[in-house]
Amino acid sequence: MRTGLGLLHLAPAVLWSMTPRELAAAIEGALGPQATHGAIDRRTLDDLIARYPDT
C-alpha cells in the first residue's frame, strides 16, 4: 500500500484493481528491476503463516 499510494501516487481504486504482475511492473518502472526481486518461496511463506497466523 505504501508503495502504490505513497511512491507511485496511485488512486486507491487503481491500486486495488491492479494484478500483482501489473503492480510489480509499476514498482520496477519506478525503482528499477532490483526492487521486485528476492520474493520468498512457498516454503518460507508457509513457515511465516504457521508462525504468525491471522487470528
Image: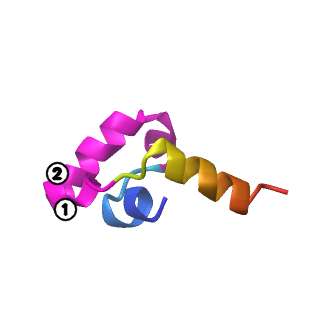
- As displayed, is residue 22 above or below residue 45? above
Q: Residues within 10 Å of mark 1 (few under 14, many from 20)?
A: few
* Residue 14 horizontal side relative to residue 53, left or right: left
Residue 31, disc? 1
Q: Going 16% across and 51% down the picture, which residue do you hit?
A: 29
Task: Specify the amino acid type for callout 2.
Answer: Gly
Q: Going 43% across and 46% down the picture, which residue do you hit?
A: 41
- As displayed, is residue 2 above or below residue 22? below
| Cβ atoms under marks 1 and 2 closer than 8 Å | yes
Q: Quadrant of residue 5?
A: bottom left
Q: Going 76% across and 56% down the picture, which residue do you hit?
A: 53
> Where is residue 51 shown, x and y percent of the image?
71, 62
Q: Secondary structure at mark 2?
A: helix
Which residue is the extreme one toward the right?
Answer: 55
Q: Quadrant of residue 23?
A: top left
- As displayed, is residue 27 above or below residue 19? below
Please name the residue that numbered disc 2 is placed on.
29
Give, as a single range, the part of the protein colored magenta: 12-38
Disc 1 to disc 2, C-alpha distance: 6 Å
Residue 9, disc? none
Which quadrant is the C terminus positioned in?
bottom right
Q: Secondary structure at mark 1?
A: helix
Q: Residues within 10 Å of mark 2 (few under 14, many from 20)?
A: few
